[in-house]
Amino acid sequence: MNADLKRRRQPTVVRAALLDAVVQEAVAGGLASVTVLGVAARAGVSKGALFHHFPSRQALLEAAYAECLLQFDTELDACMARDAVEAGRFTRAYVIVTFEGMTSTDRSWAHFSLTALVEPAFAQLWRDWLATRLESVPSERSDPRCRAARLAADGFWLQMLSDPIAQTVPEHNDALLACILTLTHAA
């Protein structure tokens, strides 16, 4: 069977390949370098197939960012489900998932999510996502220690993307994670 014909019968596979290709293109050259032709070529589909799934470059970028948020959200929920202590649970999960994402061997989705934040529409999606999540944990939203922990995790995220030396000392990352997590426990 022709590979293109087989792929046409698997629209979810094609869509996933396109979204992954967006991330890989953005990581390789920044958000501005993402082109429809580049994404289609990297995903191994035609430009027409890309436009069958996404009506525009902007829709493609937004879908990739939404997928990134969904992945983060799913990992966050799983981490929260494993935490028996309610106070600070969301923030601990936020910190842990951020650290895990930045210390894994494939950080492309985490890298893309930061790259995409230079786009005002994506930055708004992030703010809206965080505000919605924090609505469900009002005590953490107003707790300065929890906010400091989330900001520290965001700072770690940025450092890991920009400082290759920081990436080579995992025991320092573990100590930093432990230190940040202490902020999430009630005094």
Image (spheres, grey):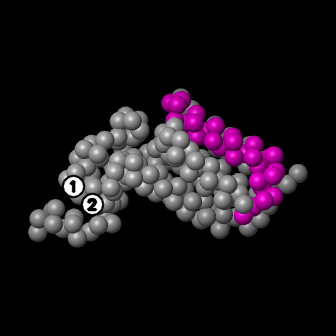
| Helix, strand or loop status at disc 2 | helix
Going by the image, does 3 lie left or right of 172? Answer: left
Q: Residue furthest front?
A: 55
| Residue 172: image location, x then y, percent | 64, 37
Residue 103 screen position, x and y as percent: 53, 44
Q: Is residue 106 above or below residue 14?
A: above
Give the residue drawn at x 39%, y 48%. 58
Residue 130 among those drawn in magenta = no
Report x, y in % for residue 94.
Answer: 65, 53
Q: CA distance from mark 2 to mark 1?
A: 6 Å
Residue 61 vs residue 49: left or right? right
Disc marking residue 18: none
Magenta-drawn stretch contains 151: yes
- For this rendering, which residue is in front, 67 or 76? 67
Q: Which residues are magenta?
A: 136-164
Q: Is residue 7 visible?
A: yes
Vertically, is 22 above or below 52?
A: above
Q: Which residue type does callout 1 highlight?
A: Gly
User: Which residue is label 1 attached to?
Assistant: 48
User: Does dot 1 land on a helix, a strand or a loop?
Assistant: helix
Which residue is at the front of the view, 42 or 65?
Answer: 65
Instruction: Report the quarter where the N terminus lies.
Output: bottom left
Dot 2 corresponds to which residue?
52
Q: Classify residue 173 as left or right of residue 15.
A: right
Disc 2 and disc 1 in contact, CB within 8 angstroms = yes
What's under tag 2, amino acid-wise? His
| Residue found 42% across the figure and 55% down from its top | 63
Residue at 55% across, 63% down: 74
